[in-house]
Amino acid sequence: MDKKYKMELFLRKLKRAFEKLFGVSFFVGLIVVLFMFSSIIFLNFKRVGAFCYVYMGDRFSQKHEYQESINYYKRALEIYPGHVRGRYNLGNIYVAYEDFDSAIDCYQNALLYDPNYINARINLGIILAEERSDIDSAINEYTKAVQVQIPFIRIPFIYDNAELIKKAKGIAYYNMGLAYRDKSLLYTSDSLVSRELLMKAIDCYKQSLDISPDNYNAQYNLALTYHLLDMYSDAVEGYCRAMLIDPRSYEAYYNIAILLRQKGKYTEAAEEFKRAGNLSSFEGETSKASFIYDVLNEVSAMAIAQHGDESEKIADRINSDIKKETDDINDPEAKALTVEELEKVLIKRIKTGSVCKEYLEGE
């Protein structure tokens, strides 16, 4: 028994010794690991803090308390300069304050950390083009934006970035088209260069429409560029397609009327000026409507003169149509239509009762 007792005592002491040794070893090992990865651990702590500050900045931004947002975004960037969304959001607020130099700095720094941040690149291009008139640099940014290769992430019913990326590239192509068009205006004395730049603008608008077929601005500006190039049929078709996308926007009607007047088709031009005037009145653009009606009166006179013996019939028809369209627009029942119902009426008229009919066959 004595030997057995001594053996058990020895084993217990040995166990305690191993436990102490293991505890010390574990503690020492933990310290070594913490020391080896201290920079990574510290960086992650900073990231967590930065994300909290950016979250607060976003909250205040949603409340339109922009100065508080700026303060939180700046705190986030002080502890973690690589927070690209914080830089991007800060840049957007500077744009709202029209502090474009600070906005450019934010977008450029965001792109240093993440060259594939497509929205930051697009916004940078817009400011360079519209606020700094640095069109070449803007085109360079848009080109980089459409060339960005971002892997698609699809989590069914939760997240899919494919459409967001495609939409952003469509916006980049559209703005690149605007930039090429603006650049063409710098070469009015060199028609060949100007035409080449406008053709590049057309290609960009088409690329944008391939991605977003219902982009009214891209379709309207495509038609406008054809108009500038005196490509009559393409311009009319382009304006007609823009009208189908947004039948309540009077600009396309007005520009078709201008084209028809240029081609000496005064009766048809009067019809489109009339529609443009009615729509601008309906949308509350009274000063523009007044101007359009002044032009309409001039074109109506041209139409009457053009038709000689039939001038009285032409005058009566134009005046009758103007009165009917105006009465329709001012009719309380017409005003009671929903926007969707009004647009359906306008689209039917565009397809069947306007100059667009021959250009939209099969639509």
Image: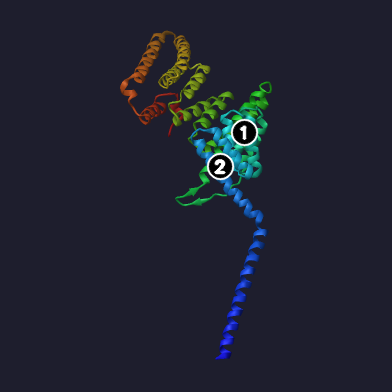
Closer to the camera in the image, 157 or 269? 157
The residue to which callout 1 is attached is: 103
Q: The disc labelled 1 sits on which kind of residue? A: Ala
Closer to the camera in the image, 35 or 286? 35
Closer to the camera in the image, 52 or 95? 52
Residue at the image point whose x is 57% and y is 90% from the top: 2
- Provide the secondary structure element on which disc 2 rests: helix
- Mark 1 neighbour class, 10 Å CA radius: few under 14, some 14 to 19, many 20 or more: many
In the displayed structure image, the side of residue 35 where residue 296 appears, left or right: left
In the displayed structure image, the side of residue 138 where residue 345 appears, left or right: left
Residue 257 in percent (x, y) is at 48, 19
Lower position in the chain sequence, tag 1 or tag 2: 2
- Provide the secondary structure element on which disc 1 rests: helix
Q: Quadrant of the N terminus?
A: bottom right
Q: Nearer the viewer, mark 1 or mark 2?
A: 2
Toward the front, the furthest residue is: 2
Q: Is residue 180 visible?
A: no
Q: Quadrant of the C terminus?
A: top left
Vertical order, 289 against 69 (above or below): above
Residue 231 in percent (x, y) is at 56, 26
Q: CA distance from mark 1 to mark 2?
A: 17 Å
In the displayed structure image, the side of residue 71 where residue 331 appears, left or right: left
Q: The disc labelled 2 sits on which kind of residue? A: Val
- Mark 2 neighbour class, 10 Å CA radius: few under 14, some 14 to 19, many 20 or more: many
Vertical order, 223 against 76 (above or below): above
Q: Is residue 182 visible?
A: yes
Q: What's the mark number on residue 47?
A: none
Residue 234 in percent (x, y) is at 53, 28
The residue to which callout 2 is attached is: 54
Residue 165 in percent (x, y) is at 55, 43
Closer to the camera in the image, 321 or 136? 136
